[in-house]
Amino acid sequence: MGKLNNKTVFITGASAGIGKACAVSFAEEGANLILSARRKEKLDALSENIKSKYGVKVYSFELDVRNSEKVKEKILSLPDEWKQIDILINNAGLAKGFSKINDGDIEDWEAMIDTNIKGLLYVTRYILPLMIERKEGHVINLGSIAGHQVYPYGNVYCATKFAVNSLSEAIRMDTLENNIRVTNIAPGLVKTEFSEVRFNGDNERAENVYKGIEPLTGEDIADLVLFAATRKSHVNINEIVVTPTAQASATQVFRKE
Ligand code: NDP
Ligand code: 8X3
């Protein structure tokens, strides 16, 4: 008997990294999953694997969270059996580029702002009313330690994660009378596709981010997301800040030679 049998979890950015690991961890606990991301073929492979391994129901579709009309359409047209969403994991997000503001690429800024802030808002805007109607639900946002501490060349990415941390607090305030739980997850270095995306497929540069340390994994974060989601209903984990043991802050990392 799983801890989340008959619960429905909606995960954005489920095709890779933390979102994918959450899909597996939540399925292991018996949850039915709504999975979304832009790369449908990755979602299809994951869905098949999860369905056959854990026997849960999976409903997946392509969704770019930057597209407010599509977000609205997809959520409002969910089949009835999928409308009762218990847990929303706002995970879709990315960093693009690593440069000073005066050298920054405006397209990269827009991709980060549109995905990490506006995308999270669009999805929350249409799912939250369904939770409020039932006076039950849990919104879990993927923030970052970059949302607590700015680091050199992190400028716009850090600003988007400061916004996520603020929005987690705001959603908590706005839904207090409706029995909605809200959790902000703020990890440090997690080895996923994150750095490859940030450095446009430059593998060597991406590998260097994790050189000499044992980084966190998507599974480590999924474990904590699951922890937050499986507390007794009167317990709200407001925030989890987590780093690799070798990382003390956004700027201090101890690397073995
Ligand atoms: P990955 O790059 O491995 O995964 C990112 C996921 O987000 C992918 O599934 C991707 O899917 C999806 N995504 C990106 N853009 C969009 C979009 N416009 N619409 C829908 N889905 C999108 O990175 P992580 O798993 O590491 O990142 C997940 C979250 O965790 C992000 O919000 C990130 O900021 C945060 N985080 C990551 C840390 C790290 O060190 N890795 C640390 C702290 C926080 P697809 O490309 O198929 O759309
Ligand atoms: C990702 C963690 O420190 O690479 O949010 O920005 S960091």
Image: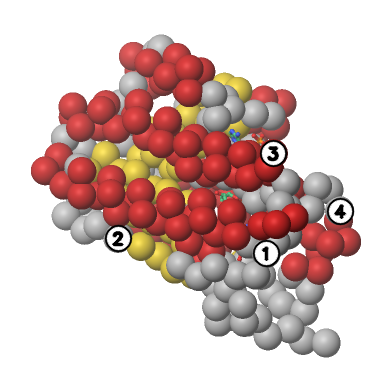
Is the residue marked 1 within 8 Å of ligand 2, measured from its CB?
no
Viewer-closest of 254 and 110: 110
Residue that label 3 marks: 107
| Place of residue 32 in the rendered image (x, y in percent of width and height, measured from the top left) | 43, 32
Element under label 2?
Answer: loop
Q: Is residue 130 visible?
A: yes
Distance in Å between CA atoms under marks 3 and 1: 16 Å
Query: Are the two marked residues, 4 and 3, in contact with CB atoms closer than 8 angstroms?
Result: no
Residue that label 1 marks: 153
Judged from this view, the residue extending furthest toward the front is 102
| Place of residue 220 in the rendered image (x, y in percent of width and height, measured from the top left) | 55, 62
Judge left or right: residue 217 versus residue 2: right
| Place of residue 147 in the rendered image (x, y in percent of width and height, measured from the top left) | 48, 61
Check disc 3 and give the amino acid type.
Glu
Distance in Å between CA atoms under marks 2 and 3: 35 Å
Give the residue displayed 44% in from the left and 43% down from the top.
89
Judged from this view, the residue extending furthest toward the left is 177
Element under label 1?
Answer: loop
Check disc 1 and give the amino acid type.
Tyr
Element under label 3?
Answer: helix
Residue that label 2 marks: 237
Quadrant of the image containing the N terminus: top left
Check disc 2 and give the amino acid type.
Ile
Indicate which disc, 3 or 1, sits on the residue closer to the N terminus. 3
Element under label 4?
Answer: loop
Check disc 4 and give the amino acid type.
Asp
Distance in Å between CA atoms under marks 2 and 1: 31 Å
